[in-house]
Image (tube, rainbow, N blue to C red):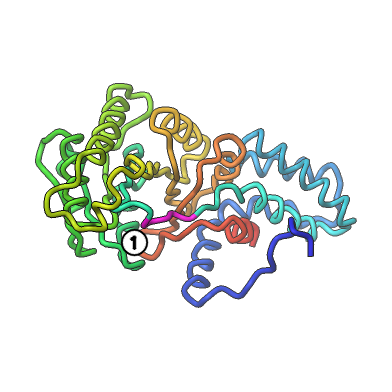
């Protein structure tokens, strides 16, 4: 078997199958505009022109669109495809291969605690995603402590508090305090109590708000200082052994709204330049016609996508699979 060939698709477990059904439903708006290109009877220049338009309308971006078209034409030639329906399957393969570098699991356990800093613009679904991520981690057996470092917005602290109660995890919070100080306290508490994960929520801001972006950098520096402090007196042995390990935050995640298309790509660039992103959470893919933005990210700023979301329920945040996404997109 060709080492570069994709592994054969296996029947997903029942829970995953339910997720795939929701993903297909969520991506229907994006996928239907692309799929209609393949309802004709012949493969010709008109088909490729329609496909180019559909991909651009789905916010795939110029570079990724051109890459996919070139790759698709090569695959069609090699497969000697003669039916548009077959070309649709080959496009799914091309999209899956383009998205493959984004597929990477979030690994917990190499550090105690693993410190995860979460950023994003207002309205992207950041705090809700933190709540869902907390549930995901708890389901995996990890103990979590939350840091409410969005200190100036009471609603954000309250919302995070609700998620903490719902997931039965601890939260470090203070009204109107310094976000960096809250982050420091949470990391210190996480180390002292031997927690597996410290999740730091930060205030939503636009990349153009330079003073607020500087605050994010300060939070990151402060988290690093907290991680470099000597192990707290009375800390658990496994926590003490991890002292001196890689400086936190170990993960810097950006939550982006799938509805914002190319603007989401601009956010990835800006936050990555400022903070050095390690991963993305892509929300609100349900109902969007701009799901092609993941291809643009893969082509221009391939930051791993740890999770994608297609709804408001706790189970509507799932790990990202390039093959699943491509197949759901063109289902």
Of residues 331 and 307, the one drawn nearer to the viewer in this rendering: 307
Instruction: Name the residue rendered at 26%, 41% in the picture.
Output: 227
Q: Is residue 294 left or right of residue 270?
A: right
309 inside magenta stretch: no
Image quarter where the C terminus lies is bottom right
Instruction: Name the residue rendered at 35%, 37% in the picture.
Output: 121
Mark 1, residues whose alpha carbon is within 10 Å: few (<14), some, or many (≥20)? some
Q: Is residue 259 left or right of residue 67?
A: left
The secondary structure type at the circle numbered 1 is helix
Q: Is residue 261 left or right of residue 53?
A: left
Q: Position of residue 211 (x, y in %)?
A: 28, 22
Q: Which residues are magenta?
A: 105-109
Asked if one can make out residue 306 in the rendered structure from this viewpoint, the answer is yes
Q: Position of residue 160 (x, y in %)?
A: 21, 51
Q: Position of residue 114 (x, y in %)?
A: 32, 51
Q: Which residue is mark 1?
A: 137
Of residues 171 and 72, the one drawn nearer to the viewer in this rendering: 171
> For the stretch drawn in magenta, what is the main secondary structure?
loop
Q: Where, by quadrant of the figure, is residue 213 drawn?
A: top left
Asked if one can make out residue 163 in the rendered structure from this viewpoint, the answer is no
Q: Where, by quadrant of the figure, is residue 234 drawn?
A: bottom left
Image quarter where the N terminus lies is bottom right
């Amino acid at each position: 078997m060709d080492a570069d060939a994709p592994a054969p698709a296996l029947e997903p477990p029942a829970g995953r199958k339910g997720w795939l059904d929701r993903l297909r439903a969520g991506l229907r708006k994006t996928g239907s505009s692309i799929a209609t290109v393949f309802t004709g009877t012949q493969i010709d220049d008109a088909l490729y022109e329609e496909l180019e338009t559909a991909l651009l309308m789905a916010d795939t971006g110029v570079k990724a669109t051109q890459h996919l078209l070139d790759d698709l034409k090569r695959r069609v030639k090699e497969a000697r495809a003669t039916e548009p329906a077959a070309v649709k399957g080959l496009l799914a393969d091309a999209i899956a291969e383009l998205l493959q570098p984004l597929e990477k699991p979030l690994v917990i356990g190499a550090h105690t605690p693993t410190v995860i800093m979460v950023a994003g613009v207002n309205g992207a679904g950041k705090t809700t995603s933190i709540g869902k991520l907390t549930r995901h981690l708890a389901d995996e057996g990890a103990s979590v402590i939350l840091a409410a470092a969005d200190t100036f917005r009471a609603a954000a602290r309250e919302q995070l508090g609700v998620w903490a109660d719902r997931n039965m995890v601890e939260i470090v919070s203070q009204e109107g305090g310094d976000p960096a100080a809250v982050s420091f306290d949470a990391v210190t508490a996480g180390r002292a109590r031997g927690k597996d994960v410290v999740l730091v929520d930060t205030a939503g801001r636009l990349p153009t708000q330079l003073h607020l972006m500087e605050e994010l950098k300060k939070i990151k520096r402060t988290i690093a200082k907290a991680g470099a402090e000597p192990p707290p007196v009375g800390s658990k042995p496994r926590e003490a052994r991890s002292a001196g390990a890689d400086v936190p935050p170990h993960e810097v995640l950006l939550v982006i709204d799938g509805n914002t298309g190319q603007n989401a790509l601009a956010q990835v660039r800006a936050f990555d330049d400022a903070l050095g992103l390690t991963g993305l959470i892509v929300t609100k893919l349900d109902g969007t016609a701009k799901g092609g933005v993941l291809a643009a990210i893969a082509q221009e700023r391939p930051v791993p996508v740890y999770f994608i979301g297609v709804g408001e329920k706790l189970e509507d945040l799932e790990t990202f699979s390039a093959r699943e996404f491509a197949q759901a997109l063109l289902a």
